[in-house]
């Protein structure tokens, strides 16, 4: 059901519709079970049979979910602050600008943390990968780990000037450590718990990718959005007026509208790999791997099934000094624009790629 709610801070603005959704599968129960499993792993007392029993636990909630959305399908921002930038943006040396030191002193440590946090398996073509994502609230003053510090620094970069409720805003973060020739399947980032519970597709305000290697497929972002309700999207064509391409590069960071379709097709990896898998900086387990740190910016909404990282000792503890940029902020690339080639215009130089979309959806996020 839909109703209207007017922003109490800006009474002249038109009301945003409020959705009242009846949940049918309780994702919050799954989130609580994940917290229990993490706690059990810390104490090394996890009982396999108990975990199997917990998978079947969960009583359906009778509560209605209320979510306000604006005309673009996002949770609305109240107050007079500007919205985040939804366009594609690229910061070629964000980590170098943030950490202020040479690569050698922090790259291996960040990669080790990414491996420790990595819980996803490489996706088969056309499918989602299974994995978990983690939450850090905007109201967290002292993050426990370096990765959480980095996630909040990225949040401030993109949402620092916005007006939002700190108690219900924050970052969803996770990592990907895959072979350089593996796929990141085509997908939309969503609140998958809300989708499972109520059949409604809500997206983050901003999605981001930070690269910790030079290898693997480029990230492709298509300015194509999906219908918000499950039943409306099955066969409807998606218009994609613009596509964006980002090749992996150590320290690089890109951001884009959280509603866009995106992926990293392995078919394109040879087009940007610099000398093949052996060119990866780092030795041993790091060679030939594609490392990424993923952060979604959520404003005035917390995804229903994400939980904080609670495995103490698995990730490096946060440093004493907050991560922050200088007054000028990180350097940003001017995004290059190229026009689409007409059929036959490029002759033999034109290569065509095609991918099959709409595979089985396991309900988990990717890059």
Image (cartoon, helix red, strand yellow):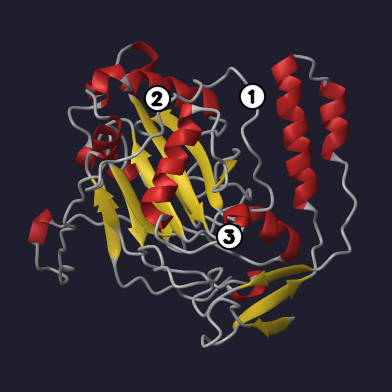
Q: Mark 3 or 2, which is nearer the eye?
A: 3
Q: Quadrant of the C terminus?
A: top left
* Element carrying mark 2: helix
Residue 31 falls in image quadrant: top right
Residue identifier under label 3? 165
**Mark 2 → mark 1, Cα distance in angstroms:** 17 Å
On screen, 14 above or below 231? below
Q: Mark 3 or 1, which is nearer the eye?
A: 3
- 101 sits to left or right of 87: left
Residue identifier under label 1? 311
- 63 sits to left or right of 290: right
Q: 345 or 117: which is nearer to us?
A: 117
Residue identifier under label 2? 110
Q: Position of residue 243 (x, y in %)?
A: 29, 62
**Mark 3 → mark 2, Cα distance in angstroms:** 30 Å
Residue 195 falls in image quadrant: bottom right
* Element carrying mark 3: loop
């Amino acid at each position: 059901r839909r109703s209207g709610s007017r922003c109490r801070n800006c009474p002249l603005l038109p009301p945003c519709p409020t959705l009242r959704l009846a949940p049918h599968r309780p994702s919050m129960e799954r989130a609580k079970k994940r917290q229990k499993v993490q706690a059990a792993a810390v104490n090394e007392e996890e009982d396999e049979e108990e975990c199997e029993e917990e998978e079947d636990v969960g009583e359906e909630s009778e509560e209605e979910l209320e979510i306000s959305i604006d005309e673009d399908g996002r949770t609305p921002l109240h107050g007079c602050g500007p919205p985040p930038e939804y366009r594609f943006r690229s910061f070629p040396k964000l980590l170098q600008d943030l950490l202020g030191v040479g690569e050698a002193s922090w790259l291996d440590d960040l990669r080790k943390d990414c491996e420790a946090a990595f819980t996803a398996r490489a996706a088969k073509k056309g499918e989602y990968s299974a994995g978990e994502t983690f939450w850090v609230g905007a109201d967290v003053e002292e993050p426990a780990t370096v990765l959480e510090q980095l996630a909040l620094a990225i949040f401030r970069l993109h949402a620092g000037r916005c007006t939002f409720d700190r108690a219900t805003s924050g970052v969803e973060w996770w990592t990907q450590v895959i072979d350089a020739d593996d796929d990141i399947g085509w997908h939309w980032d969503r609140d998958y718990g809300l989708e499972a519970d109520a059949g409604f597709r809500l997206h983050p305000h901003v999605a981001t990718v930070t690269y910790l290697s030079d290898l693997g497929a480029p990230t492709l972002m298509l300015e194509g959005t999906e219908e918000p309700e499950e039943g409306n999207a099955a066969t409807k064509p998606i218009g994609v007026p613009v596509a964006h391409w980002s090749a992996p590069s150590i320290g690089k960071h890109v951001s884009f509208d959280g509603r866009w379709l995106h992926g990293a097709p392995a078919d394109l990896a040879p087009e940007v790999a610099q000398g093949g898998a052996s060119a990866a900086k780092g030795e041993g387990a790091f060679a030939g791997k594609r490392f990424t740190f993923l952060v979604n910016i959520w404003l005035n909404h917390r995804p229903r099934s994400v939980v904080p990282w609670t495995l103490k000792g698995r990730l490096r503890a946060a440093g004493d000094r907050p991560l922050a940029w200088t007054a000028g902020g990180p350097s940003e690339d001017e995004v290059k624009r190229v026009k689409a080639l007409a059929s036959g215009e490029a002759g033999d130089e034109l290569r065509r790629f095609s991918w099959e979309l709409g595979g089985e959806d396991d309900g988990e996020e990717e890059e």
